[in-house]
Amino acid sequence: MKKIIYLLAVVLLSGCSNWLDVNTNPNTPSDVPVNLVLPSAEASVAVTVGGNMFNYGGFFAQYWGQAPEANQYNAIDEYDIKNVFFDDDYQELYAGALVDLKSVRDKAKENGDWGDYFAATVLRAYTFQVIADLTDKTPYSEALGGSELANPKYDDGQAIYEGVISELNNAMDSLTANSTVTDNDMIFGGSLQQWIGFANAMKLKLYMRESYATDAHKADVQKLISDNNFFTGDVTFDNFSDAPNKQNPWYATNISSDGLGTVNNIATYNIVTYLKANNDPRLPVLYQKAPNPDDYAGNMPGYKSRSGAKNNDFSRPIVDPTQPVYMYTQSELQLFIAEAELRYNNDDAAAKAAYEKAIDANLALHGLSTPGSDLYGTGQPYAWNSSATSEQKLKTIMMQKWVCLCMVNHIEAWSEIRRTHYPELSPAEGKDIADDPTLYTPGDMIDPVVNVLGKGQLIKRLPFSERAIIRNTNAPEQVGVTTKVWWDKK
């Protein structure tokens, strides 16, 4: 049945791209039942987060760069971000996912179907969180209002956070003992308990992401951790097969012979040197060896024109055609818990335990049998240091999060780098590091050798969708991509 639903979701998803006016609510078929519309929304979110966002998030988190003998992503690698950059993703998430989710919520509410209403609300919160984290402001309170609200206001990111948290709480309060989620659900297979765990994990992420801007939810974080009612395993869209039009979206575009065909993305010097320096067993499952040196090798970000460099000089990322789209992983959740235990509960032992659980979970995600203690045990490269300062412990957590999100969820990795400023930016320039590696601390971010934004400038946000703001009389002016989003206060 899931394969049938997946095909239907693809059909519905492909139709989303034909809705050009994303500031209005397109008329969706009124006779399509909730159990078919929900998987369409799930597919829409997954294809966006696991496709285009996964790609540019990988550049911004410096997991990969542009290969020297190709040109597809030169602009991204060199931070030459135009105002139209976010157009397609914005359109897909609003005219596709959010329209479908509105339809589910409206129909479910009318029918007293509070389980499907709840699942749609959680996915809606996730979608708005992703958009708000990228652009800081976006239509929320007046979004999807149809022709009566054809020019919705752009809400501030903090208002969006508070709004979706309220939605999550209200939807959870509406659940009854008889509430169920359709078994056509492509994320949890109809498990209401898992959706509840996802909702609680979403609230934890929202609270922690805003934690340097406001401490208003400290007690809420402490209660979430005390209750410990989170999802088990990982939150994934895992419905791909190795066949045309059914593959992982990033693989289909960037590796498949039907797409660009393995010519563009290569490992960065940052991630390869960090994993090698720590003898990390995840390196071989994240990257291939470079053919020429028969070793793992990465290039400097923004340095595709390095003299004499060839594609085969550098490692390639490993993404399989059937790899799930990871929306929220157990390792990411445990690292949020570790940070909260450290900062809000001042509980070193609990922070250490969650940190180690995160490494165990990430090893399991990659199918590795390596004992986690080989990485975090006494004397091992990622050992927890209880004698370190709180800031040093935070850095330990965040460097592990950078590794755990590699080839998993790149857009969340980039948000966490912007929020905590870990990994730190190297004081040495990339071209100098290439000549003298002793100038570099493994794992540091590297100012792209060619950086359109100027020396030392990193991307802090995406531009508003140009296609959307030129149609909306209430849209704000474009803001430069070096301007921080609201929660970036550290």
Image: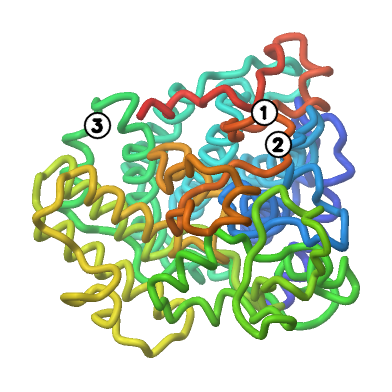
Helix, strand or loop under label 3: loop
Q: Residues within 10 Å of mark 3 (few under 14, many from 20)?
A: some
Q: Residues within 10 Å of mark 2 (few under 14, many from 20)?
A: many
Does the CB distance between marks 2 and 1 fall below 8 Å?
yes
Q: Residues within 10 Å of mark 1 (few under 14, many from 20)?
A: few
Q: Earlier in the sequence, mark 2 or mark 3?
A: 3
Residue identifier under label 2: 451
Against 429, residue 477 (above or below) is above
Left or right: 100 with respect to 489? right
Asked which quadrant contains residue 313, the reply is bottom right
**212 and 246: which is toward the camera:** 212
Q: Amino acid at mark 3?
A: His
Q: Amino acid at mark 2?
A: Asn
Q: Amino acid at mark 1?
A: Gly
The CA distance from mark 3 to mark 1 is 37 Å
Query: What residue is drawn where x is 32% and y is 40%?
Result: 208
Helix, strand or loop under label 2: loop
Does the CB distance between marks 3 and 1 fall below 8 Å?
no
Residue identifier under label 3: 217
Residue identifier under label 1: 454
Query: What residue is drawn where x is 71% and y is 58%?
Result: 51
Query: What residue is drawn where x is 85% and y is 51%?
Result: 15
Against 98, residue 266 (above or below) is below
x, y percent for residue 455: 63, 31
The CA distance from mark 2 to mark 3 is 38 Å
x, y percent for residue 448: 65, 43
x, y percent for residue 401: 40, 57
Is residue 303 in view? yes
